[in-house]
Image: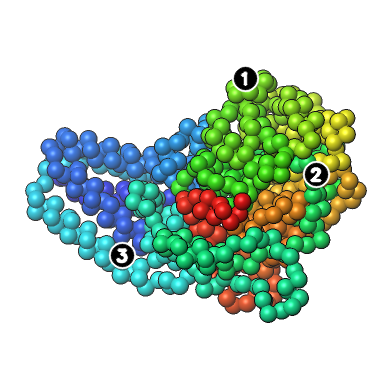
Amino acid sequence: MKKYNLLILNFFTISLFELLFNFLVFKNIFSISSIYILLLSLIISLIITIFESIFSNMVNKIISIIMIIFIFLLILSQFIYYLYYDNIFSIYSLFHGGQVFGFFGSIIEVIINNIFKIIILFIPLIIYILFIKKINYNKKNYKYIIISIILSIFIYSIFLIIINFTDKNKTYSSYNLYFSTHVPKLTVKDFGVLTEMSLDLNRSLFGFKEEIILNNINNESDSGNEVEKQIEYNMLNIDFEKLNENQNDETIISMNNYFKSITPTEKNKYTGMFEGKNLIVILAEAFSPMSINKDLTPTLYEMYEKGFQFDNFYSPLFYVSTSDGEYISLTSLLPKEGTWSMPESSNNYLPFVYGNIFKTLNYNTRAYHNGVYTFYNRNVSLPNMGYDFKACYDGLDINCGIWPQSDVEMIEKTVDEFINDEKFMTYYVTISGHLQYNYYGNTMVMKNWNKIKDLPFEFAIKCYLATQIELNNAVELLINKLKEANKLDDTVIVISSDHYPYGLKNSEIMNYVDYIKDEKFDIHRNSLLIWNSGMKENITITKYSSSLDILPTILNLFNINYDSRLLMGNDIFSNKEGLVIYSDRSWMSSYGKYDSVLDKFTSFKKDVPSSYVENINNEVYNKFLMSKLILEKNYYYYLKNNIS
């Protein structure tokens, strides 16, 4: 029987895996990315073929089968993860899969709903299996190995020559993605899953430095204008130049220069609107505009109708789902790609987060979560943010054995702990709105079923609304308790979401709401509630904003000293242009929206400056980089004597 070359089979199988993934995810049939993927797949094939050729026939065969199955499982896992989270998981998350893939039933549902696409990914594996008996697995001599190594170097040289002809000045060019910019989703699109994960592994093990782009920062201040001198800014008196005089770390110097160049936000007519009041912040699981319904959730509806209405507010989904959504809203920093930012921040100094900053103002600061206390390591991250923290199995006395747990129970068991304090700042992380949105797998759906069973909506939508009724009832109970204690007028309630309800199919959401015109961007549209009983009518804000902007907005409303240059979001009421940033570096503003995967800008206005898109790309790049460096360098601690 004729024997075929192992290298050819490896190359065919690996390149087909990569090209099919690229097509299924990015709809990429043939482009320069396809050439990159083929060249890099050939290099990978040469390398693994060497390892599959240095032992006996049987051992080589076993190694080869194990390698192909491993590659298949890796690509399949990335594909399922992408379908679930619209992103790529990192090496770090691969070893913390218990929480990344923690909702098995939902993942099975995703698999079932995309079974035909998943079957397509099996094709290369099936072809490989069919050819196993026809492959020569014999041990190769040193000459073969040397030739393979030389060939790998030659092909890699060709790849480098081609990639050097790309536009290096573009923020997310192929050259920059490969050498100097870490954006996993875009890297997979250009180079394939295996190359992205090898780059991620290399950068995790040996470090990775990205350069700050200073030349396109728009500094709006004008120190020569007498009117400008009278304007008050949300900033602290930090002498960055003096700090640089005694600094040898080039990265810290660059960060100092960057923050010095940023124009702080101005104080405005809403500054101090809630000064001295109590604050309750609720991160509501999978909260969305669908949660606000006059008949089903009347309390949330009234808060929306008589509070601030943010018409263009978004809660983009990031890499680590709820944990990243929480990190963004609490810190006004973007998550670091390739890790879990919330737990990683546990040893850092975080002076601007609610718990720490309100504690300095003699508020009692507490946090509660009706999920397991160790999930996403909240038991270490939230105390570091200044909270006395209680959750299931650690101080919170509710029925923790059901799924999901009741928000109403959490309020019942905790409100008396702080409501009689002279000053309190309380943070709740709810869980009643969690997927799955069905009857038997969700106790909140069962609990509120009679209220939604006859509604003329799709089954999953009705189940989702049932979970939001529980949130509404919890907030209603909270308000009633505050009223009884004569604390309602002196308390501000803020409700936002960790992410949109991705436990629903996009098609189900789109059949229920009318605001989704562009699925990629508008599926993340959300609601932010900022409410006080003293507000008798709504205040409508049309500016583009996101979860990244919540913290500075609240700090400004309470007239709390902070430095707006050191946060990545902006006070929504300031005169800074609104900007919504997505996990793959796409963005949206009043000028238009930019899809980083397609490298396409869609204008909302007729006259957009020619340099606008690249300037915003640079700004977004810097915000991601600064967020990462603040986390890695514990930068706020470095500034501690200046921001205490």
The image shows residue 123 at horizontal and vertical percentages of: 38, 44
Give the camera-side residue of 437 and 57.
Answer: 437
The image shows residue 315 at horizontal and vertical percentages of: 65, 49
**Vertical order, 378 against 514 (above or below):** above
Give the camera-side residue of 497 and 65.
Answer: 497
Quarter residue 520 falls in:
bottom right
Front of the two marks 2 and 3: 2
**Vertical order, 391 against 295 (above or below):** above
Viewed as shown, does residue 315 lie left or right of 620?
right
Task: Name the outermost residue toward the right.
Answer: 536
N-term-proximal mark, 1 vs 2: 2
Residue lying at 13% horizontally and 55% vertically, measured from the top left: 146
- Amino acid type, residue under disc 2 in the picture: Lys
Label 1 sits on residue:
401
SS for dot 3: helix
Front of the two marks 1 and 3: 1
- Amino acid type, residue under disc 1 in the picture: Gly
Label 3 sits on residue:
159
Residue 552 in view of the camera: yes
Label 2 sits on residue:
277
**Vertical order, 500 against 563 (above or below):** above
The image shows residue 487 at horizontal and vertical percentages of: 85, 36
